[in-house]
Image: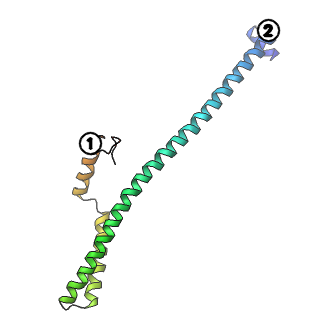
Amino acid sequence: MQRLAGEQGLSFSETVNAACRFYATATLEQQHAETVRDVLRQTIREELSAFGHRLVYFLMRIAFSAEQGKLLITNVLKFVLRLAGLDQKTYLTLVDESAKRARRNILANTPQFKSLVAEWEAMPPDRGAGKEGKRP
């Protein structure tokens, strides 16, 4: 400290005083940065949780409708095939083939799907909104 004071033409106490102020400022900035980081993490965590709950709600509705439709259709198919005099093997083949095609269709990036996504992305945030003015 004595050497630094001499190089800068200051007294020893002025140099120590400046060093203490520098340390205090740096410490406060570091504490502030940690606090801001923690607040941001908590805010992001809360927002993601709220988003996740909304998403799960809609996914559960979709899953319920899909499962109910699947059960109804398979029961109707079984009944129709029985009326037509076809065997269980035909029923199982139809169900298996439809599962394979559904899997392939889900992963397909069709022009219809692309245009639907483009329309969604072009839609203003307040259109199709719920009470909060946000997209569902």
- In this picture, residue 63 sits left or right of residue 32: left
Give the residue drawn at x 28%, y 66%.
105
Give the residue drawn at x 30%, y 73%.
70
Write down the quadrant of residue 132 in the picture. top left
Percent of width and height locating residue 23: 71, 23
Residue annotated with mark 2 = 11
Q: CA distance from mark 2 to mark 1?
A: 68 Å
Would you place residue 73 above or below residue 129 in this image? below
User: What's the mark number on residue 100?
Assistant: none
Write down the quadrant of residue 93 in the picture. bottom left
Would you place residue 12 above or below residue 81 in this image? above
Give the residue drawn at x 76%, y 15%.
17
Q: Quadrant of the N terminus?
A: top right
Task: Check disc 1: other Cα within 10 Å, few if <14, some if 14-19, many if 20+.
Answer: few
Task: Check disc 2: other Cα within 10 Å, few if <14, some if 14-19, many if 20+.
Answer: some
Q: From the image, state whether disc 2 or disc 1 is nearer to you.
A: 1
Classify mark 1: helix, strand or loop: loop
Front-most of residues 125 and 24: 125
| Residue furthest to the front | 131
Tell me if I can see residue 103 in this picture.
no
Number of residue marks: 2
Give the residue drawn at x 20%, y 84%.
80
Q: Amino acid at mark 1?
A: Arg
Tell me if I can see residue 70 in this picture.
yes
Percent of width and height locating residue 59: 37, 59
Percent of width and height locating residue 116: 24, 52
Q: Amino acid at mark 2?
A: Ser
Q: Earlier in the sequence, mark 2 or mark 1?
A: 2
Residue annotated with mark 1 = 127
Classify mark 2: helix, strand or loop: loop
Would you place residue 94 above or below residue 2 in this image? below
